[in-house]
Image (cartoon, rainbow, N blue to C red):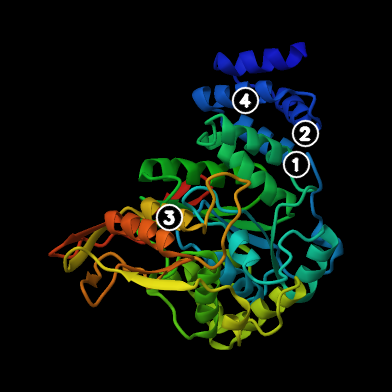
Amino acid sequence: MPRIREVIAAKRDGQELAANDIRFFVAGLTDGSISEGQVAAFAMAVLLRGMSLGERVALTRAMTASGTVLDWSTADLGRPVLDKHSTGGVGDKVSLMLAPMVAAAGGAVPMISGRGLGHTGGTLDKLDSIPGYQSTPDLDRLRRVVREIGCAIIGQTAELAPADRRFYAIRDTTSTVESIPLITASILSKKLAAGLDGLVMDVKVGSGAFMPTLALATELAESIATVAGGAGLPTTALITDMDQVLGTTAGNALEVVEAIDYLTGRARDARLDRVTRELAAEMILLGGLASDLADAHMRIAATLDSGAAAELFQKMVAALGGPGDLLDRPARHLAQAPLRRPVFPPRPGIVAAIDVKAVGLAIVALGGGRSRPEDAVDPAVGLTDVAALGAPVGPDRPLAMVHARDEDGFAEAAARIEKAYRIAEEAPLASPLLRAQFAGAKKSVRD
């Protein structure tokens, strides 16, 4: 195909591609007429040469149009269609609580989530730990659940943005995942295909994040907010801290338990609580369901205080095939590891720093994550009682409680966790939990 060679060469040489050339590339990507090698060459050219705002918008729109675009106007929802997306981290179970909270506040939330890869956990893996839960239903069932319940957390179906599915698989094997224009188009094409009225992005930054530096996180947040606006999707992006595990658990079924405890009010980790409420408030503000941010926070708090959010989570789980009494009896339904044992620090002191990526890889070593997309995941293993930055640890206060299948799994995870923590005599300076906010190209500092 002479034309695809010309498109690749133009981007290789730093030229700006016309929208027609980008649509041509995406059409060939979708129908398979462009080879894997040509797709990889295009991705590498973009990684090295970048893309202008116009190119990013054109790529996002073309990938969105490669499959079905949901139209909620005929569903008689009577509420704005909203969503949140996170770039991923360790212990990030925010979506499990946020979707029913926003639904209880008056939004409709068709949340398209992903699976974990490498050290980051995936929302779908957490939901797959719930027996019977159908994380990839057909679109008719998705529409019905959103219409009747108000929220549904599912995975990307074959109908939504199929170009992204093939493109990401090739990028993953050719070391081009890190391209910010391609990350932007990948995220937004799926969100635009979901027919949203508003999107809130949670861009993680820190040792456990995909974007380890504030400069990179800022570049991605600004790119997503600006391109989304150019593609017609109102979007706010928050940059949030991932220099420690979010919440007190990491591991699929264990995080579901923490989410249930949060929704029912049995226990709420302060950092997890704040991030969840901030993102949820921004969502309902975008949807016009609150007059200002303070009003949005009040409305979100009411969904927790009244029990409405917990009730909608239970209804969503049941509507998608899960047990109808999960909130009341999670231990009856969720897998539990046979070996549970604490990991103590080599000496007492204060947690001064955490290599959060290493903590995530400890969970992968236990079997709770995947190094390759085809790897199986053990829902029961992981960590609870994870020590946070500034926490005192010692012979009576462990770094974490390991949930493992066997002694070998525990030993490897324990060694990784002990190495991931730096213990000192004094507490570290607290890092801001919310670093910045972007609405289009406009930036504001939050903490």
Sooner in the amino-acid sequence: mark 4 or mark 2: 2
Q: Pick whichever, 35 or 384, lies toward us.
A: 384
Distance of label 4 from label 3 (alpha carbons):
29 Å
Looking at the figure, which quarter contains the N terminus? top right
Q: Which residue is mark 3?
A: 360
- Disc nearest the viewer among 3 and 2: 3
Distance of label 1 from label 2 (alpha carbons):
7 Å
Q: Is residue 393 left or right of residue 284?
A: left
Marks 1/2 in contact by CB < 8 Å: the verdict is: yes
Marks 4/3 in contact by CB < 8 Å: the verdict is: no
Label for residue 162?
1
Q: Is residue 292 left or right of residue 127?
A: left
Picture residue at 64% right of the left edge, 58% below the top: 198
Query: Three-letter amino acid code at disc 1?
Result: Pro
Label for residue 40?
4
Assess disc 3: are there few (<14), some (14-19) or many (≥20) residues with their C-alpha within 10 Å of its C-alpha: many
- Disc nearest the viewer among 4 and 3: 3
Q: Which residue is mark 2?
A: 30
Q: Pick whichever, 134 or 206, lies toward us.
A: 134
Q: Residue furthest front?
A: 407
Q: Residue furthest left?
A: 425
Query: Three-letter amino acid code at disc 4?
Result: Ala
Seen in the picture, residue 421 relative to 52 is either above or below; the reply is below
Q: Position of residue 316 (x, y in %)?
A: 71, 74
Query: Three-letter amino acid code at disc 2?
Result: Thr
The secondary element bearing badge 1 is classed as helix
Marks 4/2 in contact by CB < 8 Å: the verdict is: no
Distance of label 1 from label 4 (alpha carbons):
17 Å
Seen in the picture, residue 32 relative to 361 is either above or below; the reply is above
